[in-house]
Amino acid sequence: MKNEMTCEEVQKNIPKFIDTRMDSRDSLAFIRHIEHCKTCMEELSVEYLVVVGVKRLDSASAFNLNQELEELMYKNERKAKNRQQISLIIFFIAILLAVVGGYFLSKMILGY
Ligand SMILES: [Zn+2]
């Protein structure tokens, strides 16, 4: 998906976000949008309240929704960033292997 999301895309992806099932690029775009769009932020709060609230109906424990929502944002952001870092590391290892491999290959072929 692209780097920016429309309100429609964000709102369609809210259930995925709540379940932290979104892929890394999407969740970063999602968070970036939410941070600047009050409408979508409200939509997320409402859906989160419904999903989590329904799950908690039988448990008597009190819960702080805003804090939990913040933790959810943080969790999704961390997850996305970790995955991006891992692909970056793999990318550098691949380049390193290509350079080292090329070096030894040229040594073999040219006989230096
Ligand atoms: Zn929006």
Image (spheres, grey):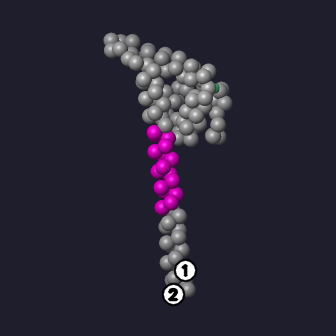
Toward the front, the furthest residue is: 36
Toward the bottom, the furthest residue is: 111
Residue toward you, 35 or 23: 35
**Ligand 1 appears in which quadrant?**
top right
* Of callouts 1 and 2, the N-terminal one: 1
Q: Residue at x 53, y 41 (%)?
A: 24
Give the dominant element type of the magenta stretch: helix, strand or loop. helix
Q: Quadrant of residue 7?
A: top right
Q: Residue at x 51, y 47 (%)?
A: 84
10 Å crowding of disc 2: few (<14), some (14-19), many (20+): few
The amino acid on which the numbered mark 2 sits, given as a three-letter code, is Tyr
Numbered circle sitting on residue 112: 2
Percent x, y for residue 73?
48, 31
Q: Is residue 11 left or right of residue 85?
A: right
Q: Are marks 1 and 2 in contact (CB under 8 Å)?
A: yes
Report the residue marked by disc 1: 106
For numbered disc 1, what is the local secondary structure? Answer: helix
How far is the residue under mark 1 from the one under mark 2?
A: 8 Å
Numbered circle sitting on residue 79: none
Answer whether residue 96 is magenta in the image.
no
- Res 51 visible: no
- Res 98 visible: yes
Q: Is residue 50 above or below residue 78?
A: above
The amino acid on which the numbered mark 1 sits, given as a three-letter code, is Ser
> Quadrant where the N terminus lies?
top right
Answer whether residue 83 is magenta in the image.
yes
Q: Is residue 34 above or below residue 91?
A: above
Q: Is residue 72 above or below residue 55?
A: below
Q: Which residues are magenta?
A: 78-93
